[in-house]
Image (cartoon, rainbow, N blue to C red):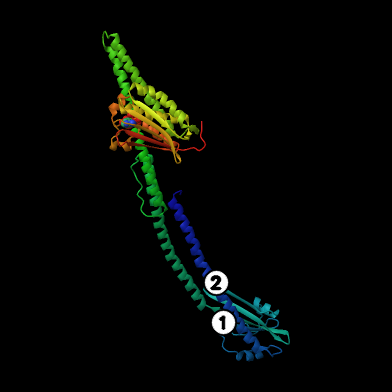
Amino acid sequence: MHSLQFRIGLSYILVLLGVLLLLNTYPLLVSEDLVFHSKTVNLQNSVSVMVNSLSGLSVLTEENVADAMSVVEETGLSRILVTDSAGRVLYDTRETDSAVGSYALYTEIVQALMGEDASSCTYRGAAFRSRASSPVLYQNQIIGAVYAYEYDTDQAALLSGLQENLLRLSAVAGVLVLALSLILSKALTRKIGLLLTAIQKVREGSYSHRADIPGRDEIARIGREFNSLTDRLQTTEAARRRFVSDASHELKTPLAAIRLLSDSIIQTDCIDLDTTREFVSDIGREAERLSRITEDLLRLTRLDSGVLEPPAAVEVLPVLEQVMRMMNLVAQEKNVDLTYSASGDCAVLGTRDEIHQVIYNLTDNAVKYCGSGGSVQVSLFSEKEDVVLTVADNGGGIPEADLPRIFERFYRVDKARSRAAGGTGLGLAIVSDTVKRRGGAVEAANRPGGGALFTVRWPRLEGGGA
Ligand code: ADP
């Protein structure tokens, strides 16, 4: 009852019934009307001819009426009556059951005796019955009436033939339209069914299922849109699964190390203080790694949720100077020469913390991966509509094959080296997401002379900031 196919089918049938009803009544009514009109006009004309032949008579008698009527041409009418002014029949064409001498007070005769022409026509029992009458006048005095009656089955047969043909035509049209509507509504509901099945399958988790809807109509287009939506869903779902599995793996490694170290302390008999200290400090380092990973994961989750702190105008230079002061100590420790240059008015829309995070992650990586004796240059400048930050180092750079994947979560070129350097594999992903959320972009490249070059572009804010 609630199915689309039922509703479409029902509306087709209702429309069809309406059309067939109209087809079977309107033409018949119009033809009936036309026949009525022509019959009454013809009959009235015949009556006028008879009235004319009676004109000139001052009084109507059976004899003079019979004389006058004998010259009237054969009319083919079923019955003709002529009455005197009282309605007594003086002349009747019917031979058996002749009404001559009796009163014939038919409605039409009464109307004629009152001075009016009268006519009527009915269609009943496969025959047209038409009646007409007119008064007979002598010096403006009504001296009688002429009444004519016609019983016609020929035209009635034509009309019923038309009716039968219309019925046959309607039956054929009805069957055709019904069959066609059934095929159409079935095709439509079949397509909707395919789409529905695809939606259900994808909802239940089979993201590889696609709706295969043929044609170019709206439903086929919805199917194609659904498929591209599912493509995106599948990609996002795959990325989410990979992220969850990578994250658990990353968390498992330091936890396993902590467990191993603590088990060693507990299970080793007579363990000396120095070894214990060494193990405990290793446990501390792994715990620190865990907290770094969870912090980075939280940061990424916040970025994913799309709920950002409201942006403000931030002047990048003071943030850069702050990061450089911090990083200088680390760089000195690693024997890396860290320098920076800044020029122009470099205000962007964002928060101080996120800009700090971006500069810190990139500089930290450069210092981490350029190795002892290397150098790192950070530059900040404005170019056209952008504020540009570049971080260049003279380390080993990044293999060309890895460049396109460097911003993916947990992607590292050299896992062991990254872990040894305290990396989480999330630093560049955080940089990329943070910058993109504020309408900027970040790129990684290798310098011609060796080393990596990272370039961040933020949309420049005119007028400066804090
Ligand atoms: P990690 O915590 O491992 O540093 P990142 O997301 O910050 O994670 O960086 C991803 C990977 O990109 C690193 O593991 C490293 O292999 C590579 N990488 C990043 N910066 C540099 C750089 N300046 N020079 C060479 N390789 C780099």
Q: Verify CB contact (< 8 Å) between mark 1 and mark 2.
A: no
Q: Which quadrant of the picture is home to ligand 1?
A: top left
Q: Give the secondary structure at mark 1.
A: loop
430 or 318: which is nearer to us?
A: 318
Residue 207 position in % (x across, y down): 35, 41
Please name the residue that numbered disc 1 is placed on. Answer: 78
370 or 227: which is nearer to us?
A: 370
Task: Give the alpha-carbon distance from disc 1 to disc 2, as whole Å.
Answer: 25 Å
Binning the other alpha carbons within 10 Å of mark 2 as few (below 14), some (14 to 19) or many (20 upward) gives few
Label for residue 351? none
44 shown above or below 6: below
Residue at the image position 69 percent from the left and 80 percent from the top: 113
362 shown above or below 196: above
One can see residue 425 in this view = no
Binning the other alpha carbons within 10 Å of mark 1 as few (below 14), some (14 to 19) or many (20 upward) gives some
Amino acid type, residue under disc 1 in the picture: Ser
180 or 233: which is nearer to us?
A: 233
Q: Quadrant of residue 364?
A: top left
Residue 448 position in % (x across, y down): 30, 37
Amino acid type, residue under disc 2 in the picture: Val
Q: Is mark 2 within 8 Å of ligand 1?
A: no
Q: Quadrant of residue 215?
A: bottom left
| Left or right: 157 in relation to 182 | right
* Count of labels in the image: 2
Residue 251 position in % (x across, y down): 34, 25
Of callouts 1 and 2, which one flags the residue occurring earlier in the amino acid sequence?
2
One can see residue 8 in this view = yes
Of the residues tagged 1 and 2, which is closer to the observer?
2
Please name the residue that numbered disc 2 is placed on. Answer: 30
